[in-house]
Image (tube, rainbow, N blue to C red):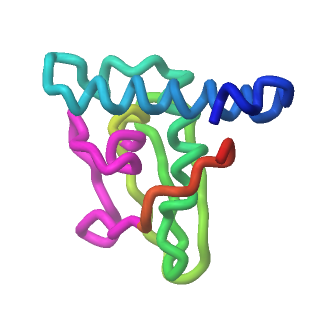
Amino acid sequence: MCRRDAARPDRVLGCALARWREAEIHAVDLAAGYRPRDWPLPFALHALDFLSARAPAEIRLALRATDTGFRREWGTGAPVEVSGAVRDLAAWMAGRRADGPLQATSGRLPDLGPWPADPAD
């Protein structure tokens, strides 16, 4: 994918971001001591933006970070707020185990949709 699109800067950026996501998230999957808490803040924010497509359509999902000023809302319907550290919110949205607690106003974390298509594809 990346080689054939090298002449298109928008595709090259998308490819670089996809590789960044793969490196950070799969480094956690290796269970070798690298955890979501180790993710750089810019990565956690990028992941939350990219993974926003996983927000359930039938609720108004609000994410509120308790350690930064991050707050986002997606969808329509009954409001559900999920709060916790920003890296833990990103881990949950990525389908990974959070290092710290996450709280949901609904009493349990909502089910997320499928992994979004990569815009670089």
Front residue of 82/3: it is 3
Q: Position of residue 60 (x, y in %)?
A: 54, 72
Instruction: Please tell me which residue is depicted at 45% across the width and 40% down the height of the picture.
Output: 65
**Residue 92 vertical position relative to residue 41 in the rendered view, above or below:** below
- Quadrant housing residue 105: bottom left
- Quadrant housing residue 115: bottom left
Please tell me whether residue 1 belongs to the stretch shown in magenta. Answer: no
Q: Please identify the dominant SS of the magenta region.
A: loop
Q: Position of residue 97 (x, y in %)?
A: 22, 43
Q: Position of residue 25 (x, y in %)?
A: 36, 32
- Quadrant housing residue 42: top right
Instruction: Please tell me which residue is depicted at 43% across the width and 67% down the height of the picture.
Output: 113
Q: Position of residue 104 (x, y in %)?
A: 32, 61
Name the image quarter holding the N terminus.
top right
Front residue of 15/54: it is 15
Front residue of 22/2: it is 2
Left or right: residue 41 versus residue 39 is: right
Instruction: Please tell me which residue is depicted at 65% across the width and 29% down the height of the picture.
Output: 2
**Residue 28 vertical position relative to residue 53 in the rendered view, above or below:** above
Left or right: residue 59 versus residue 33 is: right
**Residue 16 vertical position relative to residue 14 in the rendered view, above or below:** above
The magenta-colored residue range is 89-112
Left or right: residue 95 versus residue 9 is: left
Left or right: residue 49 versus residue 103 is: right
Front residue of 18/77: it is 18
